[in-house]
Image (cartoon, rainbow, N blue to C red):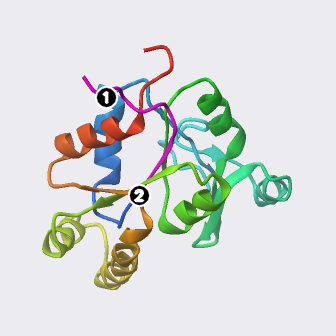
Amino acid sequence: MQARPAARLTVLSGPSGVGKDSVIEMVRARSPWVWLSVSVTTRPRRDNEVDGVHYHFVDRAEFERMIRSDQLLEWAEFAGNLYGTPRAPVTARLRAGEPVLLKIDLQGARQVRKAMPEAQLVFLAPPSWAELERRLIGRGTDDPETIRQRFAHAREELAAEAEFDVTVVNDSVVRAADELVGLLGSPALL
């Protein structure tokens, strides 16, 4: 029997519509020992969101203070809102021997690579471009212009796949989640 890798930081990234949330949901249900980082954001909290569970909600001044004091492992601005990964909880969990999973975009993955070169970057890929198009259009939540923008952004992200350490193809959520769990490592006490 092959030993599982030591617990480490794993970044999951991939284009919109590839199924990152579905894969993570399956990982969390089947492997509760995996710790998923909670991002901090300046965007307003939605009615169904809980502070500290979905995001840590802060104002812009607090977020900018976090940037200046190097409290964020990575951060970016989207649509006028700031999003980032708090550094302290990630490093604390890693020191405790717990596998840590971050779901972030390409820009964030590149920042993590610079800050923590030992991190494992995993690219979640669609089985084909046609399947990604089907998933994005099938959501039924975006207007044609937003879909066009998502396609353009997806092409950029797919072109960066070689920057990642491992590619997991999401042709089946269960299979992709199992593969990701195998890459995450195990808790120090197991």
* Between discs 2 and 1, the one toward the N terminus: 1
Residue to which mark 1 is pinned: 29
Please state the horizontal and vertical placement of residue 181, each as a whole percent of the image.
Answer: 33, 36
Quarter of the figure with the N terminus:
top left
- Going by the image, does 66 lie left or right of 49? right
Classify 58 as above or below 156: above
For image coordinates 44% across by 30% down, the residue present is: 34
Query: Where residue 165 is drawn, which disc sits there?
Result: 2
Q: Nearer the viewer, residue 53 or 89?
A: 89
- Dividing the picture into quadrants, the one containing residue 182 is top left
For image coordinates 31% across by 79% down, the residue present is: 147
Read off the magenta span. Answer: 1-12
> Considering the numbered disc 2 on the image, is that residue within a helix, a strand or a loop?
loop
Classify 85 as above or below 17: above
Q: Main secondary structure of the magenta part?
A: loop
The amino acid marked with disc number 1 is Ala
Q: Nearer the viewer, residue 187 or 23?
A: 187
The residue most toward the top is 189
